Amino acid sequence: MLDLLFQGGDPLRLCGLASAVLSIYAFFPYASDTIRGRTHPQRACWLIWSVLGSIALVTQSAEGATESLWFAAIQVIWTIAIFTLAIWRGTGPFLNPGDAYILAAAAMGLAIWAVTHDAAHALIITISISMLGGMATILKAYRAPGSETMATWIVSWIAAACAVFAVGSIDWILMAYPLYLLMLYSGIVGAMVLGRSRGRAIEFATARHVPVQTV
């Protein structure tokens, strides 16, 4: 890996490897907190992300992604690993009502790809429906910020930013997946910050016996 890192000082290679290294590190705290029972991943979300992330990885490869592909590959590996831990230490059912429709939509994207031979269709459908699972985690991060690991999402945000730069050109198909994850991680971190601020406001108001409006 060191040979690749310093070969020619290629900025795209550096960004791609930085996103990969950061992604490798990012989920260690999350996995550790899950094992210890501090973090409680939603089983349904991580199952859906495992399926959709795998599809996105294959479509990114088919569309010609190179340096940014390291980021996508490691993200998928960790997503599957966290889902495996969620089976043991997670919360919620494996499939919520409506998740079957999400999987059906993913299958439809693959079918369209098979017919049109254009991976972009499958990628767009995958990202669109993955956003639904992302919203569930953002809401959970706001309502129960202590059930998520802040360090993981901050480092993942930096990794996603590096992956966007690793694309090396304004190619919206290749940039779509890391850009989506960049926005998702921004939402999760923002929700946790707001959730913690809300919690402190409630504690302060309770201590002073002042009624506070909650969402």
Image (cartoon, rainbow, N blue to C red):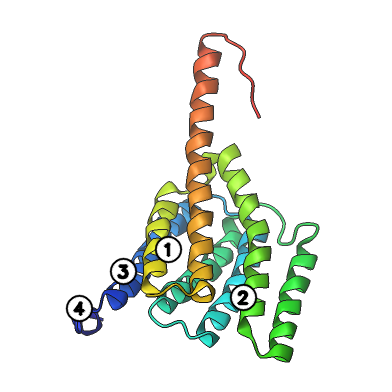
Q: Are marks 1 and 3 in contact (CB under 8 Å)?
A: no
Q: In this view, does 143 lie above or below 44?
A: above
Residue sitting at the far top: 209
Between marks 2 and 1, how big is the CA–CA gap? 17 Å
Q: Earlier in the sequence, mark 2 or mark 1?
A: 2
Between marks 1 and 3, how big is the CA–CA gap? 10 Å
Q: Do the residues labelled 3 and 2 touch (CB within 8 Å)?
A: no
Point out residue 51 in the picture as x, y percentages from the top left corner.
Answer: 63, 73
Q: Earlier in the sequence, mark 4 or mark 2?
A: 4
Q: Which amino acid does label 3 sit on?
A: Ala
Point out residue 26 in the picture as x, y percentages from the top left corner.
Answer: 39, 60
Q: Which amino acid does label 4 sit on?
A: Gly
Q: Are marks 2 and 1 in contact (CB under 8 Å)?
A: no
Name the disc covering residue 123, or none. Answer: 2
Between marks 3 and 2, how big is the CA–CA gap? 24 Å
Name the disc covering residue 65, or none. Answer: none
Q: In which quarter of the image is residue 214?
A: top right
Front position among marks 1 and 4: 4
Q: Mark 4 points at which residue?
A: 9
Q: Can residue 28 be seen in this view?
A: no
Q: Look at 21% across and 80% down and name the residue there.
A: 2
Q: Is residue 50 visible?
A: yes
Q: Which amino acid does label 2 sit on?
A: Leu
Name the disc covering residue 160, or none. Answer: 1
Q: Earlier in the sequence, mark 4 or mark 3?
A: 4
Q: Name the residue under label 3.
A: 18
